[in-house]
Amino acid sequence: MDDVDRQILAELQKDGRLTLTELAERVRLSVSPCHRRLRALERSGAITGYHAALNAPALGLGFEALVFVTMRYEDRQTVAAFEAAVTEIPHVLQAQRLFGDPDYLLRVVTRDLEAYRRLYDERLASLPGVQRLSSTLVMANLVEARPLPL
């Protein structure tokens, strides 16, 4: 990956809806070489997809919590079952496995506190192998979906 590839990635992080022509102009390439580089970046896995950034509160999902999960059992089968179950919960926007205690960090959005309570009681608390859940409410998002420093 060279400086031109990094420039292509930086431009796409700013605006994933750029046309190929616009992208080529911004990185000072003709369309064909820009297209070849773009496809190579996609094939290499450097670009994993193109997405629209949505405003959760504007869509009625204004309640956000961070949930720390401590596992009771950490055998391979239980971990696999937990991770598979977490990926099936649409309100879990991010799930990260951590070193140490707690074992996982989940970022969860819901409509309001009552919807979060139901999700917590009906889905999160019954996940495989969970010993303890601890939640903290998000007051404000200061940095979110920041572009990668290229």
Image: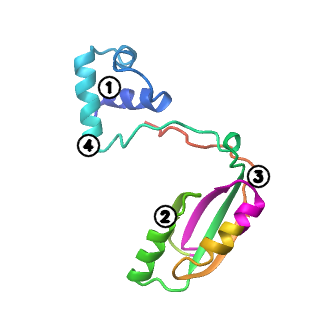
Residue that mark 3 sits on: 139
Label 2 sits on a secondary structure element that is loop
Up-down relation of residue 54 to residue 86 (above or below):
above
Q: What span is colored magenta in the figure?
A: 101-117
Q: Which mark is residue 88?
A: 2
Alpha carbon distance from label 1 to label 4: 15 Å
Q: Position of residue 69 (x, y in %)?
A: 59, 73
Quadrant including the N terminus: top left
Q: Residues within 10 Å of mark 1 (few under 14, many from 20)?
A: some
Q: In front: 122, or 73?
A: 122
Identified by mark 3, the residue type is Met
Foreground label between 2 and 1: 2
Identified by mark 2, the residue type is Glu
Q: Residue at x 73, y 68 (%)?
A: 117
Q: Which mark is residue 44?
A: 4
Foreground label between 1 and 4: 4
Tag 4 or tag 1, which sits nearer the N-term? Answer: 1
Tag 2 or tag 3, which sits nearer the N-term? Answer: 2
Q: Residues within 10 Å of mark 4 (few under 14, many from 20)?
A: few
Identified by mark 1, the residue type is Val
Residue that mark 1 sits on: 4
Up-down relation of residue 74 to residue 21 (above or below):
below
Label 3 sits on a secondary structure element that is loop
Q: Which mark is residue 125?
A: none
Pointer 3 with pointer 2, Cβ within 8 A: no
Q: Position of residue 9 (x, y in %)?
A: 39, 32
Tag 3 or tag 4, which sits nearer the N-term? Answer: 4
